[in-house]
Image (cartoon, rainbow, N blue to C red):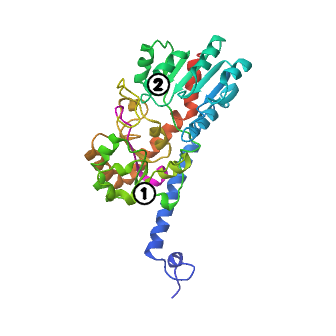
Amino acid sequence: MKTTQRTRRKRTRTGRAASPGAKAGFRLGWEHGHWFGRCEAALQGSIQPPPPLKQAHVLFVATGKGFPYSPLDIAIAEAFRGQVTQLTITDTKQPVADLALRIRPDIVLVLDGLEFDVAQVDRMREAGIRTAIWFTDDPYYTDITSSLAPHYDVVFTLELVCVDYYRSLGCADVHYLPLGADPVSFRPRNPERSQRHEICFVGSAYWKRVEFFDQVTRYLATKDTHISGIWWERLKEFRLLAGKIELGRWMGPMETANMYNGAKIVINMHRSHNDDTFNNNSAGIEAVSPNPRTFEIAGCATLQLTDARNDLVSFYTPGYDIVTYSTPQEMIEKIDYYLTHEEERQTIAMRGMLRTMREHTYVKRIERLLGLLYPV
């Protein structure tokens, strides 16, 4: 009897029928490749024209702190390119005031600025050069930023509540400008099999997070879970998750994006405003704005399950392009639901990715920043 075409497709190169494992691997590879192709097609269909060019010379002062801030330095510098007629880049470790007095930019934008001597800012302002700062860690360092902000002409903050806070300190020109996603890194990808899991969380084990994860440890231990970050040995039942936790290593943007892409569900849990770990927020300012990870996860076209902050709805629509939870039990219930409702999971993930690429990239953030600095 002749071997049918279907049978031939099932055979390996040795002539033997493919094993169940090989068939499962082929099916999984096809599913991942098909999803990646769908995402790429959607991205190609959503390409937008470049922002208008501003007639301005910007001196961008990067943090100069190195990793993990260096990817942010690079992403924002690249976002400026093509949006202004002239761009000069330096960092806070350099004699910025000397450079500014020599080249006379229209605006000096300092990123973060926690390690930048405000005496240099004062020199530039005295010389008639406009200055601005973009705080990237509010409200967790407001004990420090409160003394820095009044030295600048313009203040940008990623935390909505801090707008009024800086105004109360006498800062006249304050704007809300969250961080975003760099689509060079945080975009759909087709990662290695070893980077694929049901559930993923990337972040440090601040004490408030530990308290929450202590309540879901046993559940996560039964799933294909991957956690990466520092201090996770703080968990009460760490031994149950030890084999699923990668301790003490910071991942770069590309590796982080691969982990997001490889997960069916990525958990996002915001840092608490009153956590005892590395917190310089004695004023007790409560954060309401989404963290940068919100945009980065969504940009990877994976289902994001996040704790709800009050201003999240300004960026995404819960249940439509993002999913939220409030309690450990709700987190468990929603993980169970979306792990068994694949089409719904992918639909929400796709919507989140498309909205991120339309509205929440660093190109969009810099376009907004320039619009505020140079209104038409």
Magenta stretch containing residue 271, yes or no? Answer: yes
Q: Residue visible at 69% across and 27% down?
A: 87
The residue mark sitting in front, 2 or 1, is 2
Q: Is residue 69 above or below residue 221?
A: above
Kindly identify which residue carries mark 1.
197
The residue positioned farthest toward the bottom in the image shown: 1
State how far apart marks 2 and 1 are (Cα): 39 Å
Q: Indicate the quadrant where residue 197 lies.
A: bottom left
Q: Nearer the viewer, residue 5 or 183?
A: 183
Magenta stretch containing residue 309, yes or no? Answer: no
Please name the amino acid that badge 2 sits on.
Ile
Q: Is residue 37 above or below residue 352?
A: below
State the image coordinates of residue 368 (x, y, percent, origin top left): 55, 25
Q: Residue visible at 40% across and 23% down?
A: 161
* Helix, strand or loop status at disc 1: strand
> Residue 73: which numbered mark, if any?
none
- Which residues make up the magenta segment? 260-274
Q: Nearer the viewer, residue 225 or 92?
A: 92
> Residue 144: which numbered mark, if any?
2
Q: Residue visible at 48% across and 23% down?
A: 145
Residue 51 shows in this picture: no
Residue 42 shows in this picture: yes
Q: Quadrant of the C terminus?
A: top right
Please name the amino acid that badge 1 sits on.
His
* Helix, strand or loop status at disc 2: helix
Pointers 2 and 1 in contact (CB under 8 A)? no
Q: Residue visible at 35% across and 57% down?
A: 241
Relative to 49, 227 lies left or right: left
Q: Is residue 325 above or below residue 265?
A: above
State the image coordinates of residue 37 (x, y, percent, origin top left): 54, 53
